[in-house]
């Protein structure tokens, strides 16, 4: 690392650190210690993901192309660790809830579209945030289009949820909190066995990383009252940008619903997913600058940027229609004992397969 690059990274470190402190000061002035804690957890997640190079896009690709399920198994272990707290607490403690969703065409089609998008973008929701925070020029192109796609998906969702679907199937609600937890863990363990097959097993270090992410997800749940999610915040950013450009967002169906309406009217720091997205970006930037790697990022060629933009759009739309991404739908759904999380896993596979086949068109390796 040359001296000029190290100096530039120190400047980025100072700016990102100041940004994190500045957000914390705003929250402190509001007396919002809960949100300050959530910001800290999010920054830790961003730093951890970047330092550990933890993610789902490459893990899905390794399994589909080479039947190496070690990374994907570690990603499922995150949900198993988080489920240890989320399933019983959501069932027994007032004010806490899990992620639940109906199982129908929006979930299946949205997950498949998300799978295509994350392979073209070369990152999922959490991957976009931590690699963009880490200085990835590709993800700087993905992120705004992810927000645009999320906003477009929010306009489509009311019609999509009106389609016939199975109701939410939540194991702790059917079996009780403790039997429901056991059933959730058994199903998740079976999924781990399915992806591993006869291939390599995750290393102890990778399992340790998964456990760290799972514990941080539990802390986020403890502070937020619901599982960690990424894409709702990105959708809010897209909606606020659209409103700033003069679009009448507030009178659309989705943004007239209570939760979205309140989020649109409030600050980007007032909605938990949005706050955590900001914290994750800043945490990853701090980690990258600390390692002197923030500036060491190539700019993709034009076709790579086109793939990034299309991938971001597809992920944004797909995530909104399928009620989340690898974090909100897969990890959050499984950790809540909701069967839609398991369905989302299988629905994303054909999209990943198609996206992988088309990756060379955007200059990406298979």
Image: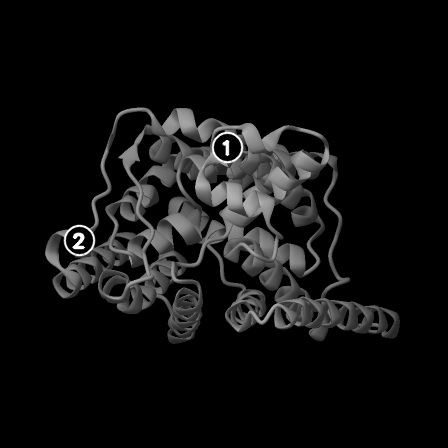
Whether residue 122 is visible to the viewer of this picture, yes or no, is no
Q: Are marks 2 and 1 in contact (CB under 8 Å)?
A: no
**Quick one: 114 or 122, which is closer to the camera?**
114
Residue at numbered disc 2: 173
Question: In the image, 242: left or right of 119?
Answer: right
User: Residue at coordinates 70% horizontally, 75% vertically from top-left?
Assistant: 290
**Quick one: 193 or 339, which is closer to the camera?**
339
- Gap between marks 2 and 1, in whole Å? 29 Å
> Which residue of the protein is positioned furthest toward the right in this rendering?
4
- Residue 60 locus on image (x, y percent): 42, 49
Label 2 neighbourhood size at 10 Å, few (<14), some (14-19), many (20+)? some
Question: Which numbered disc flags the more N-terminal residue, 2 or 1?
Answer: 1
Colouring mode (rainbow / by chain / secondary structure / one colour): one colour
- Residue 55 locus on image (x, y percent): 49, 57
Q: Quadrant of residue 96?
A: bottom left
Residue at numbered disc 1: 153
Label 1 neighbourhood size at 10 Å, few (<14), some (14-19), many (20+)? many
Between marks 2 and 1 in the image, the one whose residue lies nearer the viewer: 2
Q: Quadrant of residue 192?
A: bottom left
Question: In the image, 293: left or right of 180?
Answer: right
Whether residue 75 is visible to the viewer of this picture, yes or no, is yes
- Residue 342 locus on image (x, y percent): 28, 47
Q: Secondary structure at mark 1?
A: helix
């Amino acid at each position: 690392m040359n001296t000029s690059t190290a100096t530039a990274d120190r400047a980025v470190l100072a700016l990102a650190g100041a940004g994190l402190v500045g957000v914390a000061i705003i929250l402190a002035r509001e007396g919002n210690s809960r949100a300050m804690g959530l910001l800290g957890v999010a920054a830790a997640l961003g730093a951890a993901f970047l330092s550990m190079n933890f993610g789902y896009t490459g893990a899905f690709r390794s399994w589909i192309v080479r039947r190496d399920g070690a990374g994907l198994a570690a990603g499922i272990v995150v949900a198993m660790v988080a489920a240890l707290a989320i399933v019983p607490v959501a069932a027994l403690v007032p004010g806490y809830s899990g992620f639940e969703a109906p199982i129908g065409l929006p979930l299946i089609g949205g997950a498949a579209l998300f799978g295509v998008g994350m392979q073209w973008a070369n990152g999922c929701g959490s991957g976009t945030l931590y690699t963009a925070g880490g200085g990835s020029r590709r993800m700087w192109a993905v992120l705004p289009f992810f927000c645009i796609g999320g906003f477009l998906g929010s306009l489509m969702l009311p019609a999509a949820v009106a389609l016939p679907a199975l109701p939410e199937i939540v194991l702790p609600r059917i079996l009780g909190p403790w039997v429901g937890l056991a059933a959730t863990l058994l199903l998740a363990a079976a999924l781990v066995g399915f992806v591993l097959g006869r291939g390599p097993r995750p290393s102890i270090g990778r399992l340790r990383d998964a456990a760290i992410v799972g514990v941080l997800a539990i802390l986020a749940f403890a502070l937020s009252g619901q599982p960690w999610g990424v894409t709702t915040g990105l959708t809010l950013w897209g909606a606020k940008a659209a409103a700033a450009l003069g679009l009448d967002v507030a009178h659309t169906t989705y943004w007239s619903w209570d939760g979205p309406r309140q989020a649109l009217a409030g600050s980007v720091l007032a909605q938990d997913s949005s706050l955590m997205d900001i914290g994750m970006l800043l945490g990853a930037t701090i980690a990258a600058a600390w390692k002197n790697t923030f500036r060491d990022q190539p700019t993709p060629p034009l076709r790579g940027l086109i793939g990034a933009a299309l991938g971001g759009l597809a992920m944004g739309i797909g995530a909104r229609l399928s009620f989340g991404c690898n974090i909100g739908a897969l990890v959050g759904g499984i950790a809540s004992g909701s069967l839609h999380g398991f369905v989302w896993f299988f629905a994303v596979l054909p999209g990943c397969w198609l996206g992988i086949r088309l990756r060379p068109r955007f200059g990406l390796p298979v």
